[in-house]
Amino acid sequence: MNYQETIQFLFSQLPMYQRIGKAAYKANLDNTLALDSYFNHPHRQFKSIHVAGTNGKGSVSHMLASVLMEAGYRVGLYTSPHLKDFRERIKVNGQMITEEYVVDFIANHGAIFNEVKPSFFEMTVAMAFADDGDCDGSEDCNRPEGSSIIETDALLESETALADIHEKSRMGAFVGESGTGKTFAIRELVSTLPDV
């Protein structure tokens, strides 16, 4: 398949509620866990920040990625939806993954996709997490952070983070509160990252 055919295949896996009704809803992570096992648990190989909330997740995620890149870290970013190009969803150091990476990823792992029958989202999470070599042309490419099964090093609620960003940034730490009341300081996460 070429890039356009690969993208059409991915979108055909969308479990659209309008098309198939309540059968589109999956109440478990079985497919994600099966893919995670197949790819040897890649989410355990990198630090992650999971940004949750109703509004502002993309803005907060992009701001954090920018700050970490400026500090010299290699940063993967996984967001959705995209605006124009599917590859906007998965970036490494601000660069979208290549069309070739998308095509090769689907082609190289077709057997597991046929067996598990993952949804569009499940396949894109696997694509973001998996270490399939040169995702951006460099040998030491890190996987972007994602959602669902990650062992989160920090959790930010996007609306709280956006409301507090100016005040907290003046204090030298960026802090967000989750719905459970736990507070996570990004400074603490960054202090655990390897030196660049």
Image (spheres, grey):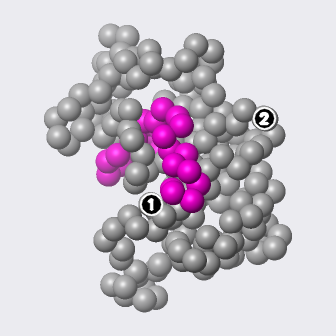
Instruction: In the rendered view, tell whether residue 111 sits above or below residue 91.
Output: below
Write the residue at 71% across / 60% down. 105
The amino acid at mark 1 is Leu
Instruction: State left or right for residue 176 relative to residue 194.
Output: left
Please tell me whether residue 123 is drawn above or below residue 39 in the rendered image: below
Depth order, front residue of 179/62: 179
Q: Residue furthest left?
A: 181
Q: Which residues are magenta?
A: 36-62
Q: Which residue appears farthest toward the top when viewing the image?
A: 171
Task: Quickly name the residue at label 2.
Answer: 139
Q: Is residue 72 visible?
A: yes
Q: Secondary structure at mark 1?
A: helix
Q: Position of residue 47 (x, y in %)?
A: 48, 32
Q: Measured from the top left, where is residue 114 in percent x and y?
A: 61, 78
Dividing the picture into quadrants, the one containing residue 176 is: top left
Amino acid bearing label 2: Glu
Picture coordinates of residue 171 (x, y %)?
32, 10
Is 194 placed above or below 139 here? above
Q: Is residue 83 above or below residue 72?
A: below
Numbered mark located on residue 33 in the image:
1
Q: Earlier in the sequence, mark 1 or mark 2?
A: 1
